[in-house]
Image: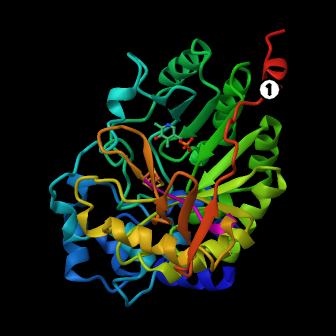
Amino acid sequence: MLLQLQERLKRLHRREDVSAAEWGDWRWQLRHRLETLEELEQFVELTDEERRGIAIAPGLFRIGITPYYAALMDRQHPKCPIRMQVIPTAAEEKVSPGEYVDPLGEDALSPDGVPCIVHRYPDRVLFLALDRCAIYCRHCNRRRMVGQETGMISRHEIERGLEYIRRTPAVRDVLISGGDPLTLSTDKLEWIVSEVRKIAHVEIVRIGTRVPVCLPMRVDDQLTSMLKKYHPLYINTHFNHPKELTDDARVACERLADAGIPLGNQCVLLRGVNSQPRTIEVLNRGLLKMRVKPYYLFQGDPVQGTDHLRTPVSAGLEILEHLRGRITGMGIPHLVIDAPGGGGKIPLLPNYLLSWGTDRLTLRNYLHQPVTYVEPQERDCSCAYDEVYFASP
Ligand SMILES: *Cc1c(COP(=O)(O)O)cnc(C)c1O
Ligand code: SF4
């Protein structure tokens, strides 16, 4: 696999001889990202739509593709799921009804003077540790703030974020996101994670990252031996298509899992990329083999210029309907719409409840066979021992 990827890369950088050591060096990968029409042209047969997309991208959202991820692209087929996630098209120019710059109303949820914190739910916060990523995904819901020329969340801002968590005892769960936190240097990431860990009321730390998907060589021994000092630590990644489940990605996930880090996947439904039930079934089976638990399946957020990538809500429901009964419950994610404007995540489920009477329910199973459940005679759900167990000391 690696040799094959390397061969492709050599063809891309014709004048350069790429050694295995360079290819496997995550900083080399970041330095050699494909960003321009000239670079992309050497690699794929671009359509007019893509050419136009690349031309308008500077005013809309940055282009950046690691050589590793670029090597997964299909040279000829413009509907290649890798290509569709990272090469812009003319459709990004169009703003459709219901689309926003900040679809989840995140900016309004930052405490005063602490822009790198988004505090929506009482017990947990999003901590935006940087505004850079390894690749720039065309469906990104934070495209307003990632990959900008200016930007760069400063050390001072991160300190204010830490200070906010220290003085907010209700926060039990800190989700370090961005941008992509695993593109920080190990030292800087360790500073942030260790400072968060020192806060007594923080119970769990989570990191959101696309690195296992687009820069798997970043998951090196230095990183995993640093991270495993800060348990309980969870990582959620973002695989969208089985084509991304390479040997390199598997090795990256296994290293993280071997460091004791439970892994989840947050997949975004993308029309024409993964909008078929079979695609998600194969993706989720593959993820479980790589020790990654499918966690969320997101309906696309209404970000300006992403209409062409969003699915109708029915597509997600059909996928869940298909998965139930065909794949272990461990491989079935929560399908959610993150409320536009900022109301939080709302779960969606196909309807399994046909009727609910006073003493019995009629349900249906995955084969659409009706099933009756008779309720128990007694229904008082209080737990008498709770008074003892939860009594204050
Ligand atoms: C998604 C999200 C979280 C985390 O939600 P979980 O359901 O706990 O994974 C936290 N804060 C914000 C603002 C979010 O959007
Ligand atoms: S890695 Fe995440 S934050 Fe970065 S561009 Fe992709 S979706 Fe956006």
Using the rendered view, name the quadrant where residue 52 is placed.
bottom left
Quadrant assignment for the C terminus: top right
Q: Position of residue 294 (x, y in %)?
A: 62, 62
Q: Does 141 sit left or right of 278 as displayed?
A: left
Q: Does 286 sit left or right of 109 as displayed?
A: right
Q: Identity of the amino acid at label 1? A: Ala
Q: Does 355 sit left or right of 284 as displayed?
A: left
Q: Residue at x 38, y 69 (%)?
A: 270
Q: Residue at x 79, y 38 (%)?
A: 231
Q: Residues within 10 Å of mark 1 (few under 14, many from 20)?
A: few
Q: Looking at the image, which is closer to me, 155 or 177?
A: 177
Queried whether the magenta region covers residue 267, the answer comes back as no
Q: Residue at x 46, y 46 (%)?
A: 132
Considering every residue shown, the one lying at the far top of the view is: 393
Q: Position of residue 351 (x, y in %)?
A: 45, 65
Vertical placement of residue 214 versus 102, above or below: below
**Residue 88 seen in this snapshot:** no
Vertical placement of residue 14 versus 191, above or below: below
Q: Position of residue 36 (x, y in %)?
A: 32, 66
Q: Looking at the image, which is closer to me, 163 or 74?
A: 163
**SS type, badge 1:** loop
Give the labeled residue for mark 1: 384
Q: Does 194 sit left or right of 213 as displayed?
A: right
Vertical placement of residue 284 versus 358, above or below: below
**Residue 148 seen in this snapshot:** yes
Considering every residue shown, the one lying at the far bottom of the view is: 76
Using the rendered view, name the quadrant where residue 194 is placed.
top right
Q: Looking at the image, which is closer to me, 365 or 172?
A: 365
Write the start and end of the magenta stretch as one range.
330-336
Quadrant assignment for the N terminus: bottom right
Using the rendered view, name the quadrant where residue 97 is placed.
bottom left
